[in-house]
Amino acid sequence: MTEVSTPTGPAIVVKGVSKRFGDLEVLHGIDLRIDRGTTTCLIGPSGSGKSTLLRCIAFLEEATAGTILVDGAPLGFTEGPDGARTRLPAPSIRAVRAKIGMVFQQFNLWPHMTALGNVCEALRTVRRLPRKEAEERGMAQLRKVGLENRAGHYPSQLSGGQQQRVAIARALALEPEILLFDEPTSSLDPELTGEVLNVMRALAEDGMSMVVVTHEIGFAATVGRHIAFLDHGRVLLDGPPEEVFGAPRHPRLEQFLETYLDRGAATLV
Amino acid sequence: MLDFGLIIKQMPAILAAFGVTFGIWIVSMLLAAALGFLVAVARRFGPKPLDWLLRAYVEVFRGTPFLVQLFLLYFGGPYVGLSLEPIPVALLAMTVYGGAYFSEIFRAGFEAVPRGHVEAAECVGLTRAQILRRILVPEMTMLVLPLCVNMAIVLLKETAVLSIITVPELTLVIGVIGSQQYAFVESMFLLALFYWLLVELCGVLGRWSEAKLSRFRFAPS
Ligand SMILES: Nc1ncnc2c1ncn2[C@@H]1O[C@H](COP(=O)(O)OP(=O)(O)OP(=O)(O)O)[C@@H](O)[C@H]1O
Ligand SMILES: [Mg+2]
């Protein structure tokens, strides 16, 4: 079964995705649908598999079963009618992956390149744009995250919040359809999380399709159009925030939120 | 009373020997670094059997004294049809010996590049070759620079061993002059001074390049 690729179809469809590391199965048949132009927040306790799911969608991990469709196109593997999976050739994997941008908890900027260099790298190396055009596009992305005046700075000369905004600009440079975020504010000092969340809010308002793994429950409840609560490698709850967070709450979610509120890590909206 | 007069008279011969030492040192260092780089890349990206083979090479050449390797190549070479003049033997031996050390330096450097930096590059569509060229090599280089300076100093000092296969380098030439002129202490003093000058040069170049690189090191994350 393959979805037909239309501009109105879902951005991502995750069907029966499982992932095992050796003997340990950490995702058990995940089904999830990411609608175009909306923000989906993945929440859940530590170790529930949020990062693993996101990394499977970015193809940084290969799912051991199931399929992921990006814009209707299968990512990494095709599944035959008999359920047998065939690995797709590398160029086709790269083409599908190009629709996806990823932002990491640890920023992962390349330390030997300036902010602009980080943003332009793929435009130059992958798209093979001439320097001038790449830099113009790179500057436009830096402007979007409010850092055009830091273009010549190296990552070591930027604050954590600024580094993460550069990382967002880098992910935007190839104009992906979907942006994935894995706890983008978790390694930031509390006073720096706001600037990053604001950039993400603006992207959401612009109609970017985003999947955000976050412990910022306030952000999830206000920006997320769709909340998926993961527990032990399964999607336990899945729906709009009013439904997921509204009473009556699932006891596991209640327990999860209490832990968070106890830690003072989030203010529940 | 130390008397440098006798030795100063031999300066042209000494400077020629200095040139030999310097030339062998620089050429073999560049070759060794290139060999070490190729070995490190092959071990990281190549098939498993190649990795084992290269690992054996590294173990053998790091595990035995340079003096012994040099002897075997120079005196044992002819038995397997490899008769070379002293200087080519010197270059070959230094390259193979230094290459083993350099490969370990580069291998550790590659491993020290955070996985996330490679993943970020994969996510924006760089191919494996592009990741090597644009991310791994530059990052690895700045991580291993101090170790490379150290290795350059080690190789410089090993050139003194080349005197035993009659390479006309500093140690041999100054030693001969010293014993002919009965100025042994003076000649050894001068020899130490030459090596120390070269080591200092390394240090200066090392500090300079580190300062250049420091602005993009230690990125807080
Ligand atoms: N490379 C790996 N090898 C083995 N086990 C792994 C690997 N990566 C993740 N795991 C395991 O998979 C499970 C899910 O991990 P994952 O990082 O996806 O959780 P998470 O929900 O993102 O947690 P957190 O909130 O702490 O980031 C954990 O039990 C983890 O130990
Ligand atoms: Mg995680």
Image (spheres, coloured by chain):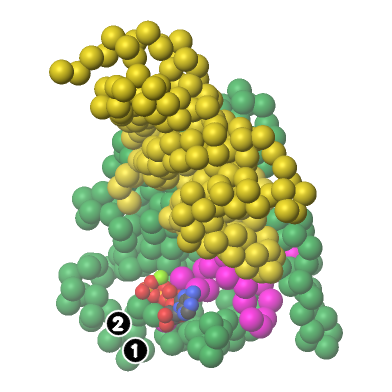
Question: Is residue A129 visible to us here?
Answer: yes
**Host chain of mark 1:** A
What is the x, y in percent for residue B190? 31, 22
Q: Which residue is mark 2?
A: A256
Q: Residue at x 50, y 88 (%)?
A: A24
Which quarter of the picture shows residue A162?
A: top left
Q: Residue at x 34, y 14 (%)?
A: B7
Q: Residues within 10 Å of mark 1 (few under 14, many from 20)?
A: some
Residue A252: give its label.
1
Magenta region includes residue A61: yes
Q: Residue at x 48, y 21 (%)?
A: B17
- For badge 2, the amino acid type reads Phe
Residue A17: give its label.
none
What is the x, y in percent for residue A217? 32, 68
Q: Quadrant of ligand 1?
A: bottom left
SS at badge 2? helix
Q: Residue at x 59, y 65 (%)?
A: B56
Closer to the camera in the image, A101 or B138: B138
- Compared to B23, does A70 lie above or below? below
Question: Is residue A178 visible to us here?
Answer: no
- For badge 1, the amino acid type reads Arg
What is the x, y in percent for residue B70? 55, 47
Magenta region includes residue B71: no
The chain coloured green is A
What is the x, y in percent for residue A247? 32, 84
- Compared to A27, does A138 lie above or below? above
Q: CA distance from mark 1 to mark 2?
A: 6 Å
Q: Residues within 10 Å of mark 2 (few under 14, many from 20)?
A: some
Whether label 1 touches label 2, CB < 8 Å: yes
Which quarter of the picture shows residue B6?
A: top left
SS at badge 1? helix
* Magenta residues, start to end: A48-73
